Amino acid sequence: MENGEIPENANEHCPGPQADSAGKSDACQGCPNQQECATAPKGPDPDLVAIAERMATVKHKILVLSGKGGVGKSTFSAQLSYALAAMDFQVGLMDIDICGPSIPKMLGLEGQEIHQSNLGWSPVYVESNLGVMSIGFMLPNPDEAVIWRGPRKNGLIKQFLKDVYWGELDFLVVDAPPGTSDEHISIVQYLQATGIDGAIIVTTPQQVSLIDVRKEVSFCKKVGVEVLGVVENMSGLCQRLTDFRFAKLTENGEQSDITERVLGYMRENAPEMLDVIACSEVFDSSGGGATQMCQEMGVPFLGKVPLDPQLCKAAEEGRSCFADQKCGVSAPVLKSIIEKLLVMNQWREELQQVTE
């Protein structure tokens, strides 16, 4: 019943925990929550006022969601933040994946700690215009499991929103855990009064992922959060032919490495092949993938990001895929998706007008 929500096990015609008649009306008779409702303090949550004050200096708030885990949502959140910061925007990245915080590693911030100032908690900064907040900075041991029930998770999310001093931000990117559970309901509820620009939903092409993404889209529609678009991640394995390892199967099924022989042959006989990019479907996309789902559900499709081993390496090493030419397959696609977001929502023009 946190923050005045009607419990799932409430009687029909429940007046709500914040009503003056809570626990006293005829509809409350026999309800398992009757005593708690009758004695609970009434009125709005005072923390929402503090959250609204903190968020008043944040111009745009973007949620990054996924229906299923392991689809690359945190990788996208990290690279989105890197890209926006590289465009000279002031960016904050908030990790509310309480049980699986991977953002500190993906931004090269493992081992960092949160510091307290007279203004509140200070984010950990990658660059002067890119700050990060995560429970990962609060764990004494990175291998320690966070075994928390919903109310404690919600309490930490509330603290991140009301106690962290972000300063003036153009964008706050919120990396949420998979699904549609406590963390998602809480972040929407706490931010709704201050305005949420919308959600970007990340998926992979196969149906087993899209089934859950459809639920994520439905969640957004139910709670009034606009779906800014869907990104199809891991949309086929793509990398330079020279980055592949070539092998030949022996009679007993073992692999015999022939990479140098193949590359040597290409250099000598077909040097034009050295610049070729090879692509292969990893997941079954015969059902139309995210493109088809977006058409059916009436939400924007932002683009396809290939499964690029160099992007995976950048995430492991905690660096931007845009900083060098190593992510030559994935970086241009990600940049195109982010540019599309800026154009569709007219964010660049709006923020330029504010600074002029």
Image (cartoon, helix red, strand yellow):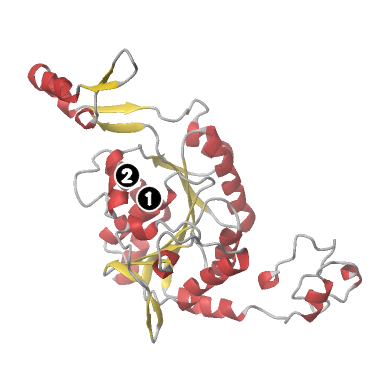
Residue appearing at x 70%, y 80% in the figure: 43
Which one is in front, 340 or 104?
104
Quick one: quadrant of the C terminus? bottom left
Which one is in front, 182 or 90?
182
| Vertical position of residue 266 compared to residue 314: above or below | above
Q: Quadrant of residue 11?
A: bottom right
Residue highlighted by disc 1: 75
Question: Does the image show residue 194?
Answer: no
Q: Quadrant of residue 214?
A: top right
201 lies left or right of 78: right
Q: Earlier in the sequence, mark 1 or mark 2?
A: 1
**Residue type at the position of mark 2:** Cys
Dot 2, how many residues are within 10 Å of its Cα: few (below 14), some (14-19), or many (20+)? some
**Residue type at the position of mark 1:** Thr
Q: Are marks 1 and 2 in contact (CB under 8 Å)?
A: yes
| Vertical position of residue 354 compared to residue 276: above or below | below
Q: Position of residue 154 (x, y in %)?
A: 57, 68
Residue highlighted by disc 2: 312
Q: Position of residue 248 (x, y in %)?
A: 26, 18
Q: Position of residue 228 (x, y in %)?
A: 48, 51
- Residue 228 shows which numbered tag? none
| Vertical position of residue 26 compared to residue 335: above or below | below
Q: The residue tagged with tag 2: helix, strand or loop?
A: helix
Quick one: quadrant of the N terminus? bottom right
Which one is in front, 253 or 168?
253
